[in-house]
Amino acid sequence: MAFHAELVAAHGQEWRQVGELLLAFVLSSIVGLERQFRDKSAGLRTQTIVGTASALFLLVSKYGFGDVALKGVVNLDPSRVAAQVVSGIGFLGAGLIITRRGAIRGLTTAASVWETAAIGMAAGAGLPLLAALVTALHFVVVIGYTPLARIIATRSHAERSYTVTYQDGQGVLRDLLQACTKQAWSVNSLVVAASRPQIGAGGHIDTADLVTVSLSITGPGVVEATEQLGAVEGGVRVDRGDEEDD
């Protein structure tokens, strides 16, 4: 009976380990809230998934091989295999991350792949309770946190930079500034680039010139500025600028 209790404890199936996982979930969610409020690429969902999966990886390393150690079947460290899985899945997740026009996409998907590896390792190491718990927490993140992240994004006052290309001579710049004022956005900086000819269909050069404006704005819901700025008549293209690495 005592041996059985020792075996269960070694397998990390007690409420203490469940509490450790939930603590990692809550603390990483708090960090994710701050990142989401500042509209960073690795926001609420990504931070929470990575934090929870990391806790599961460590618990698997600590308790997933207790039955082997107790029985004394081998004299080597079987957790080395788990360490290699963590590194290998990291390369797979990196391949899912895409940077396009200054915006980073696929971080949550990459983190989910990493989390799935942790769940599989926990199940294979004989930690079904922890594997099931992290699986349930995953759905809390992707279903429950998604609308929360959108609410935070629309109310955050993060600073964002955009590059707007428009047709010259149509008063588009004035309309852009009016659109910012209407949305209660503050324009921190504005740089107008030199005009350049517009190349139309067939490679011919149109008489109308294009003007490129780089502006940095701050205000509520600034993450949705692409749609608002793109709705200005005369605009040709709106690109989101690179994020500051902070």
Image (cartoon, rainbow, N blue to C red):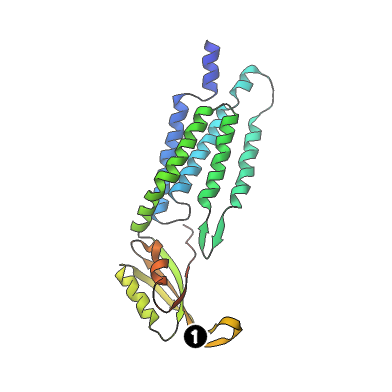
Which residue is at the front of the view, 208 or 34? 208
Dot 1 amino acid type: Asp
Farthest residue to the front: give it.
202
Which residue is at the front of the view, 160 or 146? 146
- The image position of residue 13, as x and y in percent, is 50, 24
- The image position of residue 8, as x and y in percent, is 53, 19
Give the residue at mark 1: 209
The answer to whether any part of residue 139 appears in the image is: yes
The image quadrant of residue 18 is top left
Figure disc tally? 1
Q: State whether residue 213 is above or below residue 42.
A: below
- The image position of residue 174, as x and y in percent, is 35, 80
Residue lying at 41% horizontally and 52% vertically, measured from the top left: 36
- The image position of residue 78, as x and y in percent, is 66, 29
Residue 120 is left or right of residue 146, and the answer is right
> Local crowd at mark 1 within 10 Å, few (<14), some, or many (≥20)?
some
Residue lying at 47% horizontally and 23% vertically, measured from the top left: 14
Residue 159 is left or right of residue 62, and the answer is left
Farthest residue to the top: give it.
1
Q: State whether residue 134 is above or below residue 242.
A: above
Q: State whether residue 133 is above or below residue 98.
A: above
Q: State whether residue 116 is above or below residue 14.
A: below
Residue 177 is left or right of residue 14, and the answer is left
Which residue is at the front of the view, 212 or 66? 212
The answer to whether any part of residue 61 appears in the image is: no
Residue lying at 51% horizontally and 21% vertically, measured from the top left: 9
- Which element type, helix, strand or loop, lies under badge 1? strand
